[in-house]
Image: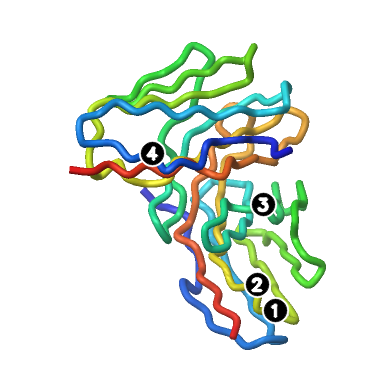
Amino acid sequence: AAGVIQSPRHLIKEKRETATLKCYPIPRHDTVYWYQQGPGQDPQFLISFYEKMQSDKGSIPDRFSAQQFSDYHSELNMSSLELGDSALYFCASSLGKENTDTQYFGPGTRLTVL
Amino acid sequence: RKEVEQDPGPFNVPEGATVAFNCTYSNSASQSFFWYRQDCRKEPKLLMSVYSSGNEDGRFTAQLNRASQYISLLIRDSKLSDSATYLCVVKTRNNFNKFYFGSGTKLNVKP
């Protein structure tokens, strides 16, 4: 079965650079979530989209923005990168209905900021 | 206080042992409950959803106690491959698209 696809899988950037992470949800899933997981930490919710509209906002820094496109894929844009942004970034998708709202995670993008 | 609390462990158990994890949640309006498993440097993978009546999947049994606001996961006959971090995840009714994660409980199954 098709899973959530994230690209790139690994990314190395320098401080103050920008990065764009992409997420392709499971086909027919209309909800996308972004999480940041630092070393030894649990996933921290950043932001989510349902039907191309932002549905919830977590601890996403102002330097980051995200959107969901008409084909339901999502992009997380990160600017003025800091060393502390180094983390594993997961995207998850779900079918945003009450009874089938299980999230399925992508393999993650490992971002290293030097 | 975190929305979802878990004992971080680690739980070190021998193969074949039975081990149980608990997770408490603070929002009584929480509606959906899940256990995820996460291996080191990998994405969380759904282990099982937790239903009010309790549910079982092979060696894994999940229970929900709404009155006390806790969820449990029981693993019987532990295998070496069960070694991982187990994340408790809760979704609240009031917030359509927000899931709260516990910090995870680390399990080490030893030969």
State the image quarter where residue B91 is shown.
top right
B12 up-or-down from A78: above or below: above
User: Quick one: A27 or A96, which is closer to the camera?
Assistant: A96
Residue marked by disc 1: A82
The residues tagged by marks 2 and 1 sit, at their Cα atoms, a distance apart of 5 Å
Are discs 2 and 1 less than 8 Å apart at CB? yes
Whether marks 2 and 1 lie on the same chain = yes
Give the letter of the chain under mark 1: A
The residues tagged by marks 4 and 1 sit, at their Cα atoms, a distance apart of 35 Å
State the image quarter where residue B98 is shown.
top right
Q: Which amino acid type is shown beneath numbered disc 1?
A: Glu
Q: Earlier in the sequence, mark 2 or mark 3?
A: 3
Q: Secondary structure at mark 3?
A: strand
On the image, the x and y values in percent for residue B9 come to: 46, 41
Q: Which mark is residue A85?
A: 2
Q: Which amino acid type is shown beneath numbered disc 3?
A: Phe
Q: Which mark is residue B11?
A: 4
Q: Which mark is residue B23?
A: none
- Which is more foreground, mark 2 or mark 3? 2
Q: Which amino acid type is shown beneath numbered disc 2?
A: Asp
Whether marks 3 and 1 lie on the same chain = yes
B45 up-or-down from A109: above or below: above
Q: Tag 2: Cα neighbours inside 10 Å, few (<14), some, or many (≥20)?
A: some
Residue marked by disc 3: A45
Q: Tag 3: Cα neighbours inside 10 Å, few (<14), some, or many (≥20)?
A: many
User: Quick one: B26 or B45, which is closer to the camera?
Assistant: B26
Q: Earlier in the sequence, mark 3 or mark 1?
A: 3
Q: Is residue A59 left or right of residue A28?
A: right
Q: Residue at x 70, y 31 (%)?
A: B92
Give the letter of the chain under mark 3: A
